[in-house]
């Protein structure tokens, strides 16, 4: 499974190679939100289902359905994605932005898309600059601070939290 394949084909291929996963072996792609920098390289993954949140699919349609050839096969999903992997709606950056919560080795990893731009944004509790609803985004930041052990932000290295504050970049 890949979350947000991004838009740099070489980066995605290098990441899959490092994980010893062939592009053909990826069977699920989850898109946190429908901004092009988060999904365009999905075209490299021929055998995937393409999942998103229902509200995000609706928002994408209302924006005129950009990249329809690729995103037209998106399927709106509910909370359970895979064993140990759940989706929660975290609107704010876009109307239907979603976060995946992954339970692994007793830790909760939050893969948040652009609900958190980077460690610095999180430390300042600062919403992404193009958020459609900055107040909702601030509530998301509080939520993550309360529940996550590790945050994978949209535009920076993953980082570990201690007592709700960023502690270590991973
Ligand atoms: Zn975005």
Image (spheres, rainbow, N blue to C red):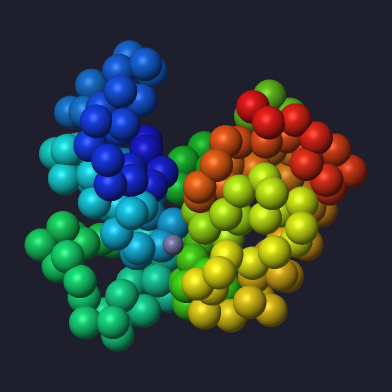
Q: Residue at x 34, y 79 (%)?
A: 58
Q: Nearer the viewer, residue 55 or 139?
A: 139
- Which residue extends farthest right? 163
Indicate the position of residue 105 as horizontal and vertical percent values: 68, 24
Q: In which image quadrant can residue 84 be found?
A: top right
- Which residue extends farthest bottom? 62
Residue 35 in sight? yes
Report the quarter where the C terminus lies. top right
- Which residue extends farthest left? 69
Report the quarter where the N terminus lies. top left
Q: Quadrant of ligand 1?
A: bottom left
Q: In which image quadrant can residue 168 be found?
A: top right
Left/right placement of residue 71 relative to residue 164 reads left
Q: In which image quadrant can residue 124 be found?
A: bottom right
Q: Residue at x 84, y 48 (%)?
A: 164
Q: Residue at x 24, y 51 (%)?
A: 40
Left/right placement of residue 165 relative to residue 19 reads right
Q: Nearer the viewer, residue 113 or 125?
A: 125
Indicate the position of residue 11 as horizontal and vertical percent values: 31, 31
Indicate the position of residue 73 as horizontal and vertical percent values: 18, 60
Check the image and report above or below for 163 versus 112: above
Indicate the position of residue 150 as horizontal and vertical percent values: 69, 38
Check the image and report above or below for 137 versus 161: below
Residue 112 in sight? no
């Amino acid at each position: 499974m890949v979350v947000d394949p991004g838009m740099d084909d070489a980066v995605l291929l290098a990441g899959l190679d490092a994980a010893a996963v062939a592009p053909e072996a990826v069977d699920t792609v989850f898109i946190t939100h429908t901004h092009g920098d988060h999904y365009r390289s999905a075209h490299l993954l021929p055998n995937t289902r393409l999942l998103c949140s229902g509200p995000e699919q609706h928002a994408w349609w209302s924006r005129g359905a950009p990249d329809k050839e690729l995103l037209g096969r998106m399927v709106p999903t509910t909370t359970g994605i895979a064993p140990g992997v759940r989706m929660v709606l975290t609107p704010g950056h876009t109307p239907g932005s979603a976060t995946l919560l992954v339970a692994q080795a007793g830790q909760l990893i939050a893969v948040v898309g652009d609900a958190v731009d980077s460690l610095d944004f999180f430390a300042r509790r600062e919403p992404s600059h193009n958020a459609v609803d900055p107040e909702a985004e601030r509530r998301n930041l509080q939520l993550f601070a309360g529940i996550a052990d590790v945050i994978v932000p949209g535009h920076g290295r993953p980082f570990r939290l201690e007592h709700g504050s960023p502690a270590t970049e991973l």
